[in-house]
Amino acid sequence: MINKRLIREVKSSQKYVGGQVACQWAMLLCNIVMVLVWSGLFQQLFVGKAQKQDLLFAVGVAVVCMAIRFVFSKLAAKMGYLAGKEVKHLLREKIYNKLLQMGTSYQEKAATSEMVQLSVEGVEQLETYFGAYLPQFFYSMIAPITLFAVLSFVSVKAAIVLLICVPLIPVSIVFVQKFAKKLLARYWGQYTSLGDSFLENLQGMTTLKIYRADQAKQEQMNKEAESFRKVTMRVLTMQLNSITIMDLVAFGGAALGVILALQELMAANISMAGTLAIILLSAEFFIPMRTLGSFFHIAMNGMAACDKIFRFLDSDVEEKGKKPLSDDLTIQLKDLRFGYEKDREILKGINQTFETGKLYALVGKSGCGKSTLSSLLAGKHHNYQGEILIGNTELRQLDENDLLKKMTLIGHNSYLFQGTVRYNLQFAAPDTTDEQLWQVLEQVKLADFLRSEQGLDTKLQERGSNFSGGQRQRLALARAVLHDSPIYIFDEAASNVDVESEEDIMQMILQMAKTKTVFLISHRLANVVQADRILLLQNGEIAEAGTHDELMNQKGSYAEMFLSQQQLEQYGKKGTNSDVE
């Protein structure tokens, strides 16, 4: 079970594999020398000719050989570690580079959870392949030939029989492999599926608790876990059965060698020393292959992971554009169509021009395509139809790094990393001074809170969970301001926060719109009143477009939605006042 491509992909590990094989072979030679010397000593004892110096010589040889074996065993272990380390580093680097090639649209090809499992557990499986299986494979080829060459001088008949029996172990391995490959592919598939479900349920635990759906998800997870348990038990059963077969071959072959040696001794064809040498070394014919068999199933699991890794590495990557963005950042949409599924179109032929230095608002009911359009503008999806032109250059032809420098997307759940406030802010501008950071924090009205904590060294937990929703959004907005790009996309950036935070965030957005091109997506229409142009999306199309006053005068869907929201908000205020009274 040699994957030539895998070996080619990690050429630098070959020297460590070769070094480990050389160490194992040196240890075998030490065993042979010890066996031959001590067999000779017992021969001398048997015939009564042994002398004190013979015993001292045998003991000396044993001590030297054991010392050499100890050194080479340590070297072999180190070589195995270095081989595994090299493989893990190279493969993870290849997966990471592939993700970088895919860019922000990588999720069109692979799920994040699957990438995590391949990069972690999948690559770990290959450590055993290079650190144990592959060296053992080559050693198990060399060892029987070496032993045959030595024992043929003692008894050609016994040496030939032992050598012939050795291939029975790999034959049994090949036989098992036919069944194991499909089973392990199924095992790995269910393993990744269970991991996907676990990650999703863990991330959505709060939502599941709120809606009391955790019990149903637990039952679903139990079913998946039970299915995985069954396939795991089938794998273990297969491994146990194959190990039993290999043990029978190994012990049976060694026993046959012993019987032949005794027969040759009784026929006076070999000496006592030769008989002892064959008896003691016959097991060495089979131990390497038997050890290889014990690594086989782990290696098979690694091969199943390897298939998935190469399938990902071989996946087509859309050739990325290299054109830089020009000074003209006018955006044009021409018959833009997009759907997450082939037979379900989200955007249905949008035509629109966005001039620079204006505030554009995208509004509409949930599911109308607002966030999808913002994702397309930010370059997150490339499998759309039609054109997205930025300065007369198609978005897919633009250099992605240049696009990301000129465009900033801020959502309602912008990711905050575990670390400090300074650490999170400097993602946007690494060379920014503390004074500049405080200036931006003053703008988003977060400075007073941070001064009451540890300032810029205030710690954030994972996803900023120790901050309130408004504080997280203010910090995300501060980071966006530091990025200082000419185009900003705010996708519900003021949602899920308190009224005060919402007003502060909206004031910041309106201030930025004086010098930047800003796209604002908001479910609350009161926030878009001052926009230069409002686009109402319905069923993936632009149903209405204009300023707030123009759309209100049309008395269409926008006016209806705006008035409806106003009535609800006024009703809420009246209800609050009544409660106070």
Image (cartoon, rainbow, N blue to C red):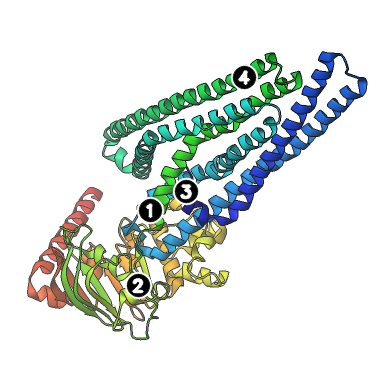
Residue at label 2?
A: 488
Q: Are marks 2 and 3 in contact (CB under 8 Å)?
A: no
Q: Quadrant for residue 106, please give it.
A: bottom left
The type of residue carrying mark 4 is Leu
Label 2 and label 3: CA atoms lie apart by: 48 Å
Residue at label 3?
A: 3
If you read the primary sequence from the N terminus, does the residue marked by circle 4 or circle 1 appear first?
A: 4
Q: Are marks 1 and 3 in contact (CB under 8 Å)?
A: no
Secondary structure at numbered mark 3: loop
| Residue in the picture at 86% in, 29% down | 60
Label 1 and label 2: CA atoms lie apart by: 36 Å
Answer whether residue 466 is visible to the viewer in this image: no
Name the foreground residue: 250 vs 94. 250
Point out the frontmost of discs 2 and 3.
3
Q: Quadrant for residue 568, please give it.
A: bottom left
Q: Is residue 467 left or right of residue 145?
A: left
The type of residue carrying mark 3 is Asn
If you read the primary sequence from the N terminus, does the residue marked by circle 4 or circle 3 appear first?
A: 3
Q: Is residue 396 left or right of residue 442?
A: left
Q: Quadrant for residue 536, please give it.
A: bottom left
Point out the frontmost of discs 1 and 2.
1
If you read the primary sequence from the N terminus, does the residue marked by circle 4 or circle 2 appear first?
A: 4
The type of residue carrying mark 1 is Arg
If you read the primary sequence from the N terminus, does the residue marked by circle 1 or circle 2 appear first?
A: 1
Mark seen at residue 311: 1
Residue at label 4?
A: 260
